[in-house]
Amino acid sequence: LVGAGWPTLFRRVPEAMTAYLPTGALGMLVVLLGSHSLYHWAHPAAAVHDPVLHAKAGYLNLPFWTARAALILSLWWVFARAIVMNSRLQDKDGDVERTHKNKRLSAVFMIVFGLTFTLASIDWIMSLEPHWYSTMFPWYMFGGAFLHALAAIALLCVLLRRRGFFPELNEHHLHDLGKYVFGFGVFWAYLWFCQFLLIWYANIPEETAYYVLRSSRGWMAAQALSLLANFIAPSALLLRSASKKDDRTLIAACLSVCAGRGLDLYVMIMPSISASARPGWLDLPIFLGLAGVFILIFDRSFASAPVVPEKDPYLVESLHHHG
């Protein structure tokens, strides 16, 4: 969003969302404490009689995994704080150079994020099944994460407008947000199909095992619901141009994507650690609890700065945005 004119009006929304990063990083401590239950390779004896794990032991070991996680999360937090603090300084002095600086920081972070997110996808999720591999997996993870981020931003913007914030937010802003959600929903489905197709026609046992497991014991239903919520439902809702400008339709599509992202992660993670596709009785309370924590942190961060960045040089362009 940095450097683009039309999102300037509501740029506080993604800025406030970054405040959740330290809390999310603390969640990784829970993963670290439960690593022996989650990751088969985390047991020192696992590689003794397993040639695949033995070959990967130099990379898949707990100290190195922990160091990578700490580095990844630290880099994300450092760049997020640098960009947000530069934005806050611009609220005081209105210096246009701060916009240019944020563009440069964002350009560097795009490279850093591409590399670190690839490592995070492999380390945190793909290594749950250390014998499986997919060259498409980091791309697939990125497509899902970016789609979810866009849906969350659009949803928060519309809900905040209903509470009296962003009265200047017009149908053209909504239309652009809707186009992003629609477009990256198609992109996510494309990546889902590409990964499946590459593994299906190669027919390599180490790769097909991933989909064989997720096509049995009820997992297929969860996978079908994920496709429905992430792609089919939002695409149908946002297909018409008028639908993208309607806040009720946009809310429904974004809620569908948010639920679909949860299902997508559930299908990626749970078959590796659970024999049953039935959700546990604690799954929903934990999800709602974390969602509540996010809302509290977002609300506190959002209220800590002016809602509209009045000294941003692109604000006039955003206020008069007409598509």
Image: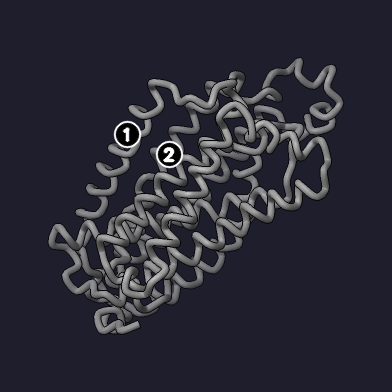
**In the rendered structure, which disc, 1 or 2, sits on the residue that comes first in sequence?**
2
Q: The disc labelled 2 sits on which kind of residue?
A: Gly
3D distance between C-alphas at marks 1 and 2: 15 Å
Residue type beneath disc 1: Leu
Q: Position of residue 68 (x, y in %)?
A: 62, 40
Q: Quadrant of residue 133?
A: top right
Give x and y (percent) for residue 97.
Answer: 39, 78
Q: Residue furthest left?
A: 164
Mark 2 packing: few (<14 Cα in 10 Å), some, or many (20+)? Answer: few
For label 1, the SS is helix
- From the image, tell me which residue sits under label 2: 24
Which of labels 1 and 2 is toward the front?
A: 1
Residue drawn at x 53%, y 22% is 33
Res 254 seen here:
yes
Q: Which mark is residue 288?
A: 1
What residue do we see at 30% from left, 82% from top?
Answer: 321
